[in-house]
Amino acid sequence: MKENKILLFDEDIERSAVIDSGFKAKDINSVLINTEIELENLVSDSQNNIVLITHQSLAKVSKSNIKSLFKQADTKKILVYAVPNDATKIIAFYKLGAYRVLDETFDSVEIVEYVNNLYYQHNNNGKHEETRFSGSLSDFSLADLINSFGRDKVSGVLRVYTPYCSGKIIFNTGDIDDAVSGFHYGEEAVLFMLTWSDGFFAMRKCPIKSPKHKVQLSNIGLLLHGETVRNTYKDIIRKIGHTGVSIRLINRGDVLPHLKNEYYKVVADKLVNFAILQEVLAFSQINFIELAEWLFELKNQDNLDIRDDSGIDVDNLPEMESHQKSGLAEHLLGAKEVDYLREILHAEEVTTGKLLILATDIMDKTNFIHIFNRGDRTPVRTNKELDYTRIDLDGYFSLNVFGVSLDQKLKDSIQKVSQGLLGYIILINAKKPENFEYANYIIGFLKDTYTAPWTVVITNTDDDDELFNKVEAKIKIPENRDLIPCDISQKDDIKNAILSLK
């Protein structure tokens, strides 16, 4: 029996019993927690290296104890599981300090298997080490991944995430055995995911002990059928808008007498209020093509209200008054440096433009912008969603600077500020490796979508070359580019990061 214990706090008694039984079958010492007081006392025990807690249990813990728990994230691995399929919530837990967030598509067996791997890594037993392969759908399409895993006869679970929904595909010696996304299962779930072109994925190779054989079509059959489905789907969605728009029924009473079945009534009831299109398609028991066609019919009947309000509302930022500063602080950039910045931003012929600061850590972007803004008369406006300021670099050139966190549904936000976008800087916190996958996805998306100059900056390395090298090995950028180290508190580092745009 191993010395280290796993703490398990789950408000679902039946589920916690199943998970606990799974641990004991693998000769792992686990302790069931039933109250917040037990959690507080047991977490302080240095022998407890892994804490497993559900989303709902965490919601019942006081804020002070939550802070106390996640303060120990450097020495303990905190896993939050049974989290709703919401990309924003998942990334929010990562930012809080969770080592791993397991959404509600993970069943009890998968949770036990994942923790088993992690537990034995703590005890330096390499044969249990987890094998993962992850990346962006912009680099590897789902069809390519299916072909690759089929050819290599891989067994394991492939998880795919988009800003609005997620799904998983189970492979058994290369064949797709089962799949789920929202309320779609089996072959339909695979076909639905094959329509996704945005997002990121993570493949965990592991033996499939109890195949379900819910998918009868071969991988090739699914891909051939999927191509037809994808083209049909994209054509319908294009006529509605895009998958991130919000939709609402204008007059529910007009459609109720003509609904085909109860599933359509559920959707009609949901659409009394605005809901994101892809979430409606994912979390409905109606075939997603059939439902998309019905929604398009409602649009043609002028009974579907459509608005694009995803992301941050940057269209209605109020004008900010300029306040005279003391004059003691010099501008960050001198005259020659401003000229050089205009040159690398290709802004010699413009008087104003936009610069995006995107960060995996909320405070990094805020501190970065405050130092960049030093000496300017315009204050920085900051709230939980957005930092914004206008920086007058000289009498002829100013930048509207927006700071956005990578834990938001930011694609549509970026679209809103893309007109006049001169460049963007991505800040990645070296001490939060759980965000690296998503950062790689965003880097790939931005460089493929916009031609503006950009740079990737690594923060919080504490001048530790070994830590910087580890991050460098994980972040995917072209060979002709360098990652830029940066101490957010140092103005010379901020200046260097800005002037590294290319």
Image: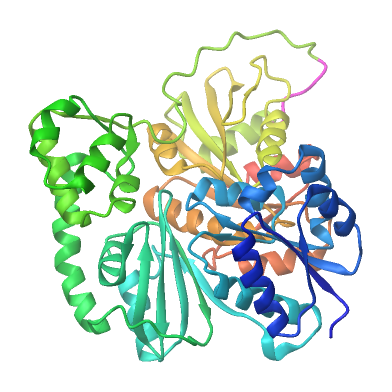
Q: Residue 249: x percent and y percent? A: 22, 30
Residue for point 69% across, 61% down: 99
Q: Is residue 276 left or right of residue 88?
A: left
User: Which residue is at the front of the view, 195 or 351?
Assistant: 195
Q: Is residue 345 among what the camera can see?
A: no
Q: Position of residue 218 (x, y in %)?
A: 24, 84
Query: Which residue: 73% across, 31% down?
Result: 371
- Which residues are drawn in magenta? 328-333
**Residue at the extreme front of the image, as rendered:** 14
Q: Is residue 317 visible?
A: yes
Q: Nearer the viewer, residue 13 or 481?
A: 13
Above or below, comparing residue 320 to residue 170 in the picture: above
Q: Main secondary structure of the magenta part?
A: loop
Magenta-drawn stretch contains 162: no
Nearer-the-camera pick, 488 or 38? 38
Q: Is residue 265 left or right of residue 374?
A: left
Q: Is residue 263 left or right of residue 489?
A: left
Q: Quadrant of the N terminus?
A: bottom right
